[in-house]
Image (tube, helix red, strand yellow):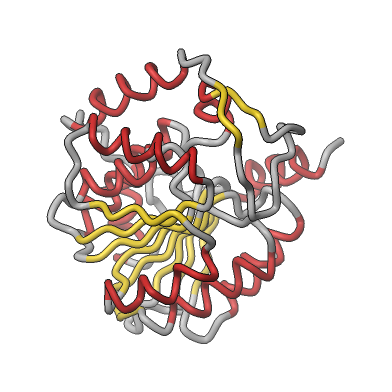
Amino acid sequence: MSKLIINKLKYILFSKHRKGFGIHSPFIYDLITLVFNDKTDKVAYPKIDLLRNKLLKSNEIISVTDYGAGSKLFKSSERKISEITEYSSVKKKYGELLYRISEFYKPKTILELGTSLGLSCSYLSLGSPNAKVVTIEGCPQISNIAQNTFYLLGIKNITLVNGKFDEILPLSFFDLHSLDLVFFDGNHTKQATLNYFEQCVKYSNNDSIFIFDDIHWTSDMEQAWNEIKKNKNVTSTVDIYQFGIVFLKKQLKKQDFIIRY
């Protein structure tokens, strides 16, 4: 049995509080009941769905430059856009959650590490259309597609920067000054994830939210996630298997939740 399947089974076994019952933290209770369980139809959802379906039908082949941990699925750098959309882009369920988190907490600044085809950033941006958004993507050809995604959705508050995270990330801090929401979705290695977290936390504030994708993807990522949970700046964390959500709010009690989502 693969490590990934074992991790999923462990999550199913230990996750709970799907409806918020038994949660004694009002802040986390609101997250579950008002954000996780918000079933409202949002205007942005069908717009992104249409574009996602268009990408899923594209047989265009591009050359992918990958500076991170690489792909477990793809052995070649030549990939169809449809395959990248299906296997590497944020899934609808979690993209819509990103939208609701952005809409509910109303971040003024958003940083994304790993743009991919632009779907996740679109959810974040449309959830908080007045935010200043910076997203970084290492691959030039993927960056071009993401830029077109933003154009087709009419999004004007996103600055997409193509380049290596290590080179671009410090410049983003000067541009954003303070980080209200950060989505970490690139270079899925332990040390890189921890390095980016340590850099970003210096520009955080009491209301900052950090969201980490694929926290159970590899043992490397699980180790990174466990170290992040122990960080002195972190108060409450929420593990929903796909995402690890980190809160830095000093008023919160130090707690780690595994929530069924």
In the drawing, does residue 4 fall left or right of residue 148? Answer: right
Quadrant location of the N terminus in the rendered image: top right
Task: Tell me which residue sits at (72%, 46%) in the image.
Answer: 7
> How far across and down, in percent of the image, does residue 21 sit?
39, 51
Task: Tell me which residue sits at (32%, 33%) in the image.
Answer: 149
Task: Tell me which residue sits at (27%, 79%) in the image.
Answer: 177
> How far across and down, in percent of the image, does residue 199 sit?
49, 79
Q: Residue furthest left?
A: 130
Residue 230 falls in image quadrant: bottom right
Task: Tell me which residue sits at (22%, 32%) in the image.
Answer: 153
> How far across and down, in percent of the image, does residue 112 sit?
40, 57
- Seen in the picture, residue 166 relative to 70 is either above or below; the reply is below
Residue 122 falls in image quadrant: top left
Along the line of sight, which residue is nearer the eye, 258 or 84? 84
How many marks are shown on the rendered structure? 0
In the drawing, does residue 208 fall left or right of residue 188? Answer: left
- Seen in the picture, residue 183 relative to 169 is either above or below; the reply is above
- Seen in the picture, residue 181 relative to 135 is either above or below; the reply is below
Along the line of sight, which residue is nearer the eye, 20 or 234? 234
- Seen in the picture, residue 79 relative to 236 is either above or below; the reply is above
Q: Residue furthest right?
A: 1
Residue 187 falls in image quadrant: bottom right
Along the line of sight, which residue is nearer the eye, 123 or 70? 70
